[in-house]
Image (cartoon, helix red, strand yellow):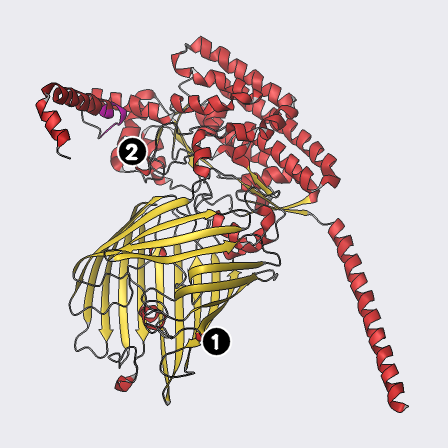
Amino acid sequence: MATKKRENKMKYNHLKHITSAFITLAIVLFAHSAWAKGKKIRVVTSTPDLAAITMAIGGEHVEVTSLARHTEDPHYVDPRPSHIVKLNKADLLVVNGLELEVGWLPGLVVQARNKNIQAGAQGYLDASSVVKLLQVPTQAIDRSQGDIHPGGNPHFTYDPRRALNIAAAVEKKLAALDPDHKKDYAKNNESFSSDLGTVIKTYEDKFAKLSSEQKQVVTYHASTIYISDWLGLKEVMQVEPKPGIAPNPKHIATVLTAMRKQNVHLIFQESFYPKKASQKLAQLAKGDLVVIPGGTNVSDGQTYIKRIKTMADAIYKAASK
Amino acid sequence: MMLQPHILIKHKAVLWTLVLFALLYSTQAQAQQPSEPAPDDEVITRQLEEADDNATPPKQLDTQDNPAQESEVTAEDSAPVQEEEELSDEELKALEAALAEDLEAQEDTPSLATTASTQGFSQSTMGRTLQSMNPDISLILDVAAAGFSNTPLQGGAHDPNQNGFNLQQLEMHIESNVDPFFELQANIVFSQFGVEVEEAYARTLALPANLQLKAGQFLTQMGRLNPTHPHSWSFLDQPLVNGKFLGGEGSRGLGMEVSYLTPLPWFVELTASSTMATGACCARSFYGGQDLGVNSPTDLLYTTRMEHFFALSDSFSLLWGTSAQFGPNPTGLGNRTEIYATDLYLRWRPLNNPSRTSVSLQVEAMHRRRQTAGDILVDNGGYGQLVWDINFRHALGVRYDFVEGIAGGLDTIDPEWTENRQRATAQWTFYPSHFSRLRLQAGYDNPGWYERPILIAMLGAEVLIGAHGAHGY
């Protein structure tokens, strides 16, 4: 008898444990779903410009991280394992594409073990697929011509007109991933596009008034073609003899002669390229070197529009001298 | 075979035509490529004009825009750019105005931009479409000239190991996604004496629960350097401890690997693999050259690794790994070998430095225990290296190697290695571009059982062609 009672008591105890376990589970699940409802869409972008554009469209519903910093050359980002952790938890990955990130991103994406952000998946957006590209090689290329991107020049986020296309694609993606806030994304894109449109127009008008001589420019790397395309500037030469090949004295002499002959007074380049050669050139050609940031300073809260304005202002100031 | 030259010689007309073609071609080639600037002013001007053309090649824009014409917005944009060269200023201005109007239209109707984006694929060029189905294929050639003051004792299979010229390796790397579930990576290495499958494995892309599986022939996660290939090493040769404990080709084999990315807020990855324990090249401390077969799971080689990564600041980062290997050795039934290893990689790279300066310190230490008939052999080894990437053209590195020996010739694998061995190496790298490097290396190798140390000098060249995948951290 005594044993049986004990057994019964044990059974009862088991039951109690199971019930409490279920209740705990239910609470956890409920809490989880509630938390999931208020959960933000986690977006990882390869470059800070893409992050800034995504922030403008996603607003409060997204949490955006850029793997590259605005001071970093997007060709050569350290593939830190901490990036894997970010990619692992991402709902959406926005890449620049055209092999800009080929040296560091693909391995990270594989290691991230996140099927949602693999190339071609729902949570993957290649910005280069939605913009009109420049400098797509049409002849056979090889690397004796320098570090050429076979798909075309990948630095298109410098052009706000192309940013409009990217913003539209981001809006579509976010709406697909988070249909609850579809309207908000559309609204954000509308206001972003109209603000950016005003900026585009303003600077186009401003630059249109410059003389064709003032609009000539020498750039460091062949990465600025989209800025020139937007503002109607004419890129006379590059400080680099070929993309990715460091400048040599002979080539710099050629550049200087060209600048003097054609009256070029403007050099611009990104902050992550060496500045000395360009500074010297600017000094000798009695011109100005404009150092433009390689990306939006998102970590300090800069917006894409602000970044474009700052960049265009700096170029205008030097060009209109 | 001999027919063709005969025909050429017999028919002088053919020969002359060929000569003419060659001449024409050479003049064309000259016109296309501005060579060295000559002092002659006219020549400079001409070259500048050519260079000018190169800077903004209108032709390139041309064809790029053609496939884009299906999309309304871009097709309209492209019109003025296409004919830029032949147009007068006035016409240009008119076209510019048209372009501006186009853009205004684009601003006013964001829906148009959306249309463009949905038709993104129509804008991709022929080149991209063609390339997308081919795997990334690259070929890496490592050759070196070397001189040793004494009989060389290089342990790595790809080390320069003879006086004179050395083919370190010709490595063909092929990789691609197979489907949404797998990727394939293959590393085929050609030497003067044959071809070997260094690595060939499939890796999963879409397993749940942060898991990843690898199956095939692969380098095990035994330490930091082991799973990497010579072309991502800073030095021309392998550290001594890797050669002695793991094998000339590093620790690798046929097998399976599972790895798990923990959900911790910092990077922690756990890896475990099981591989065949044979191969003098690549499972040296285990079955090595003797293939005793697999009769139970204990006859396989097991490797585990835990890796932590800490982003100490924007510029400083630290990777810490611990690895261990367990497997059978051929000295007797049930005899086992264990290797324990730990490695540190401390890297400083200021993110805003334009010259891409970085300094990295890498240290690995290994502890090996081997059961033999009636004895347990224990030895230790390790290396530390400091590499300063001064900028994207130059790098300097120093390395110190230390490996213990076992006295009395008890060590059946390296009976002559009876005392400690130390080696100091200094190295300078010059990168003409991102795809080639020249390395000059000097070494002072001091095996305790040698009467005199070995002085080493090496000059190595490495070139890479093709599309090569991204390297890890």
Q: Position of residue A47 (x, y in %)?
A: 52, 42
Task: Give, as a single range, the part of the protein colored magenta.
Answer: B29-35
Observer able to see residue B250:
yes
Magenta region includes residue B33 = yes
For disc 2, the neighbor class at 10 Å (few under 14, some 14 to 19, many from 20) is some
Give the vertical position of A53 relative to A234 (above or below): below
Q: Amino acid at mark 2?
A: Ile
Nearer to the camera, A260 or B322: B322
Q: Quadrant of residue B359?
A: bottom left
Q: Is residue A10 left or right of residue B403?
A: right
Q: Amino acid at mark 1?
A: Ser
**Which residue appears at 37% of the width and 50% of the height?**
B173
Q: Tell me the distance, in whole angstroms, between the alpha carbons under discs 2 and 1.
A: 68 Å
Give the vertical position of B160 relative to B19 (above or below): below
Q: Position of residue B88 (x, y in %)?
A: 41, 9
Q: Is residue A195 left or right of residue B156?
A: right
Q: Position of residue B11 (x, y in %)?
A: 10, 21
**Residue at numbered disc 1:** B296
**Which residue appears at 14% of the width and 23% of the height?**
B19
Q: Position of residue B293 (x, y in %)?
A: 40, 73
User: Which SS class for mark 1?
Assistant: loop
Q: Chain of mark 1?
A: B
Q: Is residue B248 left or right of residue B131?
A: left
Q: Is label 2 on the same chain as label 1?
A: no
Q: Which mark is residue B197?
A: none
**Residue at numbered disc 2:** A252
Q: Chain of mark 2?
A: A
